């Protein structure tokens, strides 16, 4: 029997959820019962095959009217907690887009409220549904790359100025006195941070022992678009470097460094490269479990939930560190250059710097970027690994 669903936030990234719900509806797993938007969708905005769902700007009223069992919440970041708890109080289960909340306090309010309501909440880190994640964990446990030294992550993306004007909260750290924290590491490339922590097995808040951030911006925005973070854990560091000002867009990846090899995971492609001493490179493609499908399977058949809130606690510690850090400083004009034809700004050399941070587990400032936050001098030392070319 299919499960009735309400989607809150059906424009922007919400269009992806509409298409995904349509796919699962065709399989008989779900039915789109309602759409919550401030301005109702026109018939042309609703994909074929989804019928005529009820529409309302009031999520609570829509849930009451439809009797939906699941709410998919893909609304502005500051609204996540209140809308999720509105649904939870009605006994409605949740798929909540990442980042789950703009602060650690809001995250705890969300997680505690969901627990109290006795409902299930799945956080929308789609990369954690990849079958590559448990496969890499098995490789690590089996000692395929020796002793794990740490995990690096690299995200070199291109975004134009319109990206930061797509919504009033885009590119903001706060709006009307409310936290937003829409930075490169907390939203567009948040998967790199969450996936790196997951591969190391350090996903809970208590796994984090320290966080260092370097937050910068080339665009005329409030939040950061070129940043790096190093998260200290008992199992080693997780260092992620990211930019929205790349010279060329590249597939983001995370990189497990071992004493005798390394594992590269292109998480959007579910593709894994194993490089280890005494062996040739081994590349494997994996499947992926859709998180909404997994939530339905959990409710109907007891499947293990893949991304419950507590497994994003470490990521939320990173969000909190970025939220409480000094506001990102603008990069000097000599560091970036405009590309008027593409309506964007590029930081020359940032693509290589992002890759170098993932390779060495070092921050920008430690790699010699004179525009980064000042730190005590340190010569980065690359982890021991086979003599292989860095992934790009």
Image (cartoon, rainbow, N blue to C red):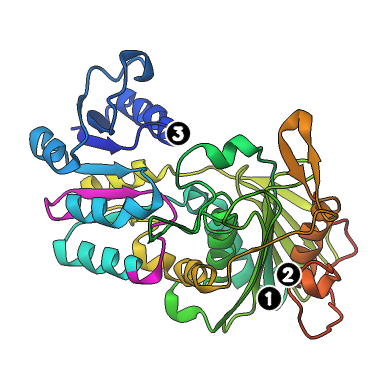
Residue at figure coordinates x 66%, y 37% from the top left: 160
Residue numbers of the magenta segment? 88-105
Residue at figure coordinates x 29%, y 20% from the top left: 50
> Can residue 355 be spotted in the picture?
yes
Distance from the alpha carbon under mark 3 to that under mark 1: 39 Å
Q: Are marks 1 and 2 in contact (CB under 8 Å)?
A: yes
Residue at figure coordinates x 74%, y 64% from the top left: 358
Task: Please identify the residue farthest to the right as the structure is shown.
Answer: 387
Q: Position of residue 295 (x, y in %)?
A: 31, 47
Q: Which residue is mark 1?
A: 148
Q: Which residue is mark 2?
A: 257
Quadrant of the drawing holding the N terminus:
top left
> Quadrant of residue 214 in the image?
bottom right
Q: Position of residue 327 (x, y in %)?
A: 58, 67
Q: Position of residue 338 (x, y in %)?
A: 79, 41
Q: Earlier in the sequence, mark 3 or mark 1?
A: 3
């Amino acid at each position: 029997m299919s499960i009735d669903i309400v989607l809150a936030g059906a424009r922007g990234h919400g269009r992806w959820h509409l298409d995904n719900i349509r796919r699962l509806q065709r399989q008989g797993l779900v039915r789109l019962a309602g759409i919550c938007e401030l301005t109702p969708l026109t018939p042309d905005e609703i994909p074929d095959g989804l019928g005529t769902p009820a529409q309302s700007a009031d999520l609570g009223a829509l849930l009451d009217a439809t009797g939906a069992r699941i709410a998919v919440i893909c609304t502005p970041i500051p609204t996540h907690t209140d809308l999720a708890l509105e649904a939870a109080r009605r006994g409605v289960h949740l798929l909540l887009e990442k980042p789950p909340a703009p602060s650690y306090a809001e995250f705890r309010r969300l997680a505690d409220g969901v627990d109290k309501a006795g409902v299930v909440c799945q956080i929308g880190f789609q990369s954690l549904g990849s079958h590559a994640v448990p496969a890499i964990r098995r490789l690590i446990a089996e000692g395929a790359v020796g002793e794990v030294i740490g995990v690096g992550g690299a995200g070199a993306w291109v975004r134009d100025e319109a990206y930061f004007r797509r919504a009033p909260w885009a590119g903001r750290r706060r709006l009307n006195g409310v936290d937003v924290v829409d930075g490169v590491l907390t939203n567009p490339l948040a998967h790199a941070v969450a996936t790196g922590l997951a591969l190391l097995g350090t996903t809970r808040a208590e796994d984090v022992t320290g966080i260092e951030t370097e937050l910068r911006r080339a665009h005329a925005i409030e939040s950061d678009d070129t940043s790096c973070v190093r998260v200290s854990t008992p199992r080693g560091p997780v260092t992620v470097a990211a930019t929205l000002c790349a010279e060329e867009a590249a597939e983001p990846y995370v990189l497990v460094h071992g004493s005798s090899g390394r594992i590269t995971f292109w998480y959007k492609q579910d593709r894994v490269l194993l490089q280890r001493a005494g062996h040739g490179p081994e590349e494997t493609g994996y499947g992926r479990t859709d998180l909404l499908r997994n939530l339905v399977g959990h409710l109907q058949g007891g499947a293990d939930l893949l991304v419950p809130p507590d497994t994003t606690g470490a990521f939320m510690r990173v969000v909190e560190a970025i939220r409480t850090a000094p506001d990102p400083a603008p990069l000097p004009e000599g560091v970036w250059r405009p590309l008027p034809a593409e309506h964007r700004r590029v930081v020359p050399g940032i693509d290589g710097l992002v890759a170098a941070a993932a390779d060495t587990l070092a921050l920008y400032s430690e790699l010699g970027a004179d525009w980064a936050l000042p730190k005590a001098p340190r010569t980065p030392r690359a982890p021991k690994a086979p003599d292989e070319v860095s992934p790009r």
